[in-house]
Each structure stands twice: as C-alpha cells, then as structure tokens.
Image (cartoon, rainbow, N blue to C red):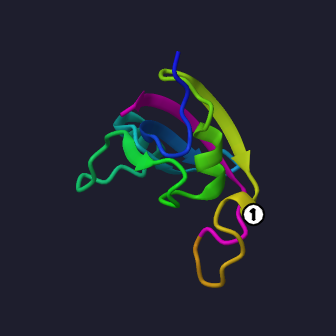
Amino acid sequence: MTVAKNGDTVRVHYHGSFPSGEVFDTSLIEEAKSAGIYDPRRDYEPLKFKLGAGQVIQGFNDAIVGMKPSEEKTVTLPPEQAYGHRPGHPMSGKTLVFRITLVEIV
C-alpha cells in the first residue's frame, strides 16, 4: 500500500485541540457543532494540501508523512513544531494536539 510522502497532495480530516481538551479547529462538522465552534460559512471538508510545500505547520506535515489512506493518528506538537513563539499570533507558544485521518493521497 502506498504511504504519503513529501511532494504528494493529500486530503486529511483533522481535529485540533489544546492539551486541556478544548477544541480550536476541526474539519468535521459534527465535531465542530459539539465543541461549540461551528461556523455555517465554512466548508467542513477534508483539508487538501501538498506535503512538504510549507502549506501547513511543520509538525502537522511531518505527522502525515508515512501514513496510509484511512490511517488515523494523534500527535502532540510542542510550539516549535506548531506556530513557534510569534509575538501577536494567537497560537504562539501553545502545544497543540491533532487527531489526523489520511482520507486519500490524490
């Protein structure tokens, strides 16, 4: 079975939370509703991007490399693998937890 590698375009569902369990983002509509973060203006579809192209935070990208379609994993990213320590950025200095499901390698 093929595994995701840098250079591949992938589609993933994700659930992002803080270590406390508070959800800050998800691509899944039911999870957004249950977490109280649902936005009717948003499309709740798998996130599509090219691995290794800098389109997502480094730790998120690295977690997907080596995954197989339909595989799910949970990763905890320290700030250095997420948004770092950028003054003024709302995610600066935060540890993030992502549950990621690789939907497909396009």
Front residue of 4 and 93: 4
> Where is residue 42 drawn, in percent x and y?
27, 53
Q: Residues within 10 Å of mark 1 (few under 14, many from 20)?
A: some
Residue 22 visible to the viewer: no
Residue on which disc 1 sits: 80
Q: Is residue 80 magenta?
A: no
Q: Position of residue 36 (x, y in %)?
A: 43, 48
Predominant SS along the magenta part: strand
What kind of residue is marked 1?
Glu
- Residue at (49, 46) in percent of width and height: 7
SS class, disc 1 = helix
Where is residue 26 shown, x and y percent of the image? 45, 45
- What segment carries the magenta color? 91-106
Q: Residue at x 55, y 44 (%)?
A: 6
Q: Is residue 47 above or below residue 42?
A: above
Res. 9 image quadrant: top left
Q: Position of residue 17 (x, y in %)?
A: 60, 48
